Image: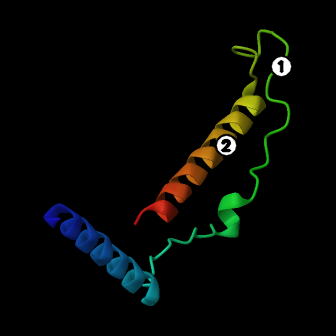
Amino acid sequence: MVRSLLHRLALTLGAVLLLSACASDPVRVEVPVTQRAAPPAELVAPIQPPGPIFSAPSAASLACVDASGKDSLVSYVEALRQRVAAWEAWAAP
């Protein structure tokens, strides 16, 4: 008898709690969402690759790169390094 009464009381209490939870207004929780920043146009502009750098092996070239090819390769690598530095500077907090 006592066990049945406790069981019935627990069920009634559970039903009341369930109904009160369903009757209340839902809680709205706003969470900030980070937005992706758009990089500047100069960072996404393509870097023009140099023209022909390598040449046929000859006495005037070292490792198949002549003087004009060397200058063009060095300037291309420097442009790439500058672009990486610009990206790092832009992305730093």
User: Which is more toward the observer, 68 or 51?
Assistant: 51
Q: Residue at x 56, y 50 (%)?
A: 84
Q: Secondary structure at mark 2?
A: helix
User: Which is more toward the observer, 76 or 46?
Assistant: 46
What amino acid type should be assigned to the residue bearing mark 2?
Ser
Q: Earlier in the sequence, mark 2 or mark 1?
A: 1
Query: In this image, 34 relative to 74: left or right?
Result: left
Question: Mark 2, residues whose alpha carbon is within 10 Å: few (<14), some, or many (≥20)?
Answer: some
Disc marking residue 55: 1
Q: Above or below — where is 87 with respect to 69? A: below
The percent coordinates of residue 46 (x first, y second) are 76, 53
Residue 17 appears in which quarter of the rendering?
bottom left
Q: Residue furthest left?
A: 2
For label 2, the residue is: 75
Residue 50 appears in which quarter of the rendering?
top right
Residue 49 appears in which quarter of the rendering?
top right
